[in-house]
Amino acid sequence: MRRTVVLFLLSSLAILLLAAPQSRGDGVDTFTFTEVGGGVVVSDTWQSLATPDTSGNFSAGIGFLLPAVPVDFFVYDQLFQSGPVDLSFYSSSTGELFEAGGLFGLVGTGLFGLDGTDQLYCGSEGSPTFLPGTYTGTDSDSGLTGTLVISAPEPSSLLLLFSALLSIAGVLFVQKLQL
């Protein structure tokens, strides 16, 4: 009987430990880049997979490219324009951390970027994982102070429900064994 309780507790602990890295919900991060200059507030918002597929679009030790990412461009919280942007993310060894270019068909133009902050991803350039957080640095194109916020969604409601039901079942199982 005690062996069953120990086995139950160890298996529950294993499930909870393995579920923690998967608690990112749908695996899509939201990026918001904001800068203020000359009384104008500009922000850019896009979404990307937390671990994007960079096959064929990376240089080991240098960075990776996410081509044609849909970005919403806001001025004073009003949608100004939307369109595909090529986003380049670099290793912290290069100095620049990310840059956007090619907005609305203007290939090769720099739009916004971020220098002088911590690296935005971990892992290799072939399999990067974005690190949620707030990063402040200098916009590599305008010279203004820019802030990039990478936010991960809340855990899936089904994962939370499953964890609660598992906990209740465990308590009932242990109480039944004690009787």
Image (cartoon, rainbow, N blue to C red):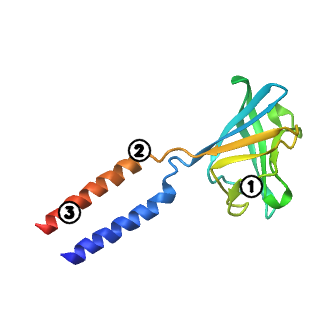
Q: Amino acid at mark 3?
A: Phe
Q: Earlier in the sequence, mark 3 or mark 2?
A: 2
Question: From the viewer's perspective, is 31 left or right of 37?
Answer: left
Residue at numbered disc 1: 118
For the residues labelled 3 and 1, say whether their Cβ atoms are less than 8 Å apart: no
Residue under the point 73% across and 23% down? 76
Mark 2 residue crowding within 10 angstroms, few (<14) / some (14–19) / many (20+) = few
Q: Secondary structure at mark 1?
A: loop
How far from the left and from the top, in percent, is residue 162? 35, 52
Front disc: 1 or 2:
1
Q: Earlier in the sequence, mark 1 or mark 2?
A: 1
Question: From the viewer's perspective, is 175 left or right of 87?
Answer: left
| The label number, if any, that marks residue 157 in the structure image | 2
| The label number, if any, that marks residue 173 in the structure image | 3
How far from the left and from the top, in percent, is residue 160? 39, 49
Real-space CA distance between mark 3 and mark 1, rounded to the nearest whole angstrom: 47 Å
How far from the left and from the top, in percent, is residue 143? 88, 40
Q: Outermost residue, front direction?
A: 39
Real-space CA distance between mark 3 and mark 2, rounded to the nearest whole angstrom: 24 Å
Q: Amino acid at mark 2?
A: Ser
Q: Quadrant of the N terminus?
A: bottom left
